Amino acid sequence: MSDIRIHACTGEDVHVLALLNKQLIEDEKHDNPMSIEQLQDRMRQFMEIGYAAYTFVEDERLRGYALVDHRRDPLYVRQFFICRDSRRNGYGRLAFAKLLAYLDSPHIDIEVLRGNESGYAFWKSLGFQERSVYMRLELPQELQ
């Protein structure tokens, strides 16, 4: 494994980011039904309102990405994804360490979906601690 570089994304990168975001949604078992086109639009909107996207690249090979809300204090990592063929090889740890150094922030917030056990274990292994439990009530169709 050689060194991973961080690439700050621009609007030209939203298609690739949307494709990766779709995989992230599938992998974390999220209920988001958005299409690639909708995810592109949403990614573009995120970047217009103060989020920044970063890709992790090794020897010209894309290893993953992160989406960070720079308006919040502490900074909020909304999305963090390592490509499926790059997992379980240390790329997640390396990419996050690079991102942390790049962001130069003493505090970072994340959220992990309840059913994403591997994501939860990954973040715990990096030293993240639970600070809250986010809950949702979904009313049955007949009560809406």
Image (cartoon, grey):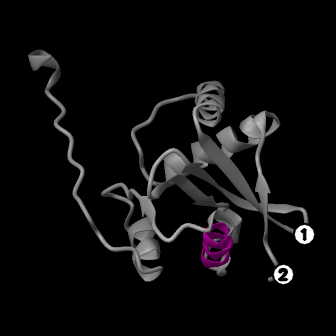
- Is residue 141 positioned above or below 109 on the image? above
Q: State which quadrant residue 21 falls in.
A: top right
Question: What are the residue bounds of the magenta stretch?
Answer: 93-101
On screen, residue 5 versus residue 89, left or right, reads right
Residue 47 sits above or below residue 38 on the image:
below
Which residue is at a point 66% across and 30% down the rendered structure image?
44
Q: Quadrant of residue 128?
A: bottom left
Residue 105 at what x, y percent from top left?
55, 67
> Which label is found at residue 59?
1
Q: Are marks 1 and 2 in contact (CB under 8 Å)?
A: yes
What residue is shown at x 75% (from left), y 42% (from top)? 16
The dot on residue 137 is none
Label 2 element class: loop
Mark count: 2
Q: Residue at x 68, y 72 (%)?
A: 98
Identify the amino acid type marked 2.
Answer: Ser
Is 48 on the left-hand or right-hand side of 71? right
Percent x, y of residue 126? 47, 79
Is 41 covered by the magenta stretch? no
Residue found at x 59% / y 42%: 51
Whether residue 117 sits left or right of residue 85 in the image: it is: left
Q: Looking at the rendering, in which quadrant would you find the N terminus? A: bottom right
Horizontal side of 57 relative to 89 (left or right) equals right
Report the predominant secondary structure element of the magenta stretch: helix
Task: Give the image location of residue 34, x and y in percent.
Answer: 52, 29
Q: Which amino acid type is marked by label 1?
A: Asp
Which comes sooner in the sequence, label 1 or label 2?
2
Image mark for residue 2: 2
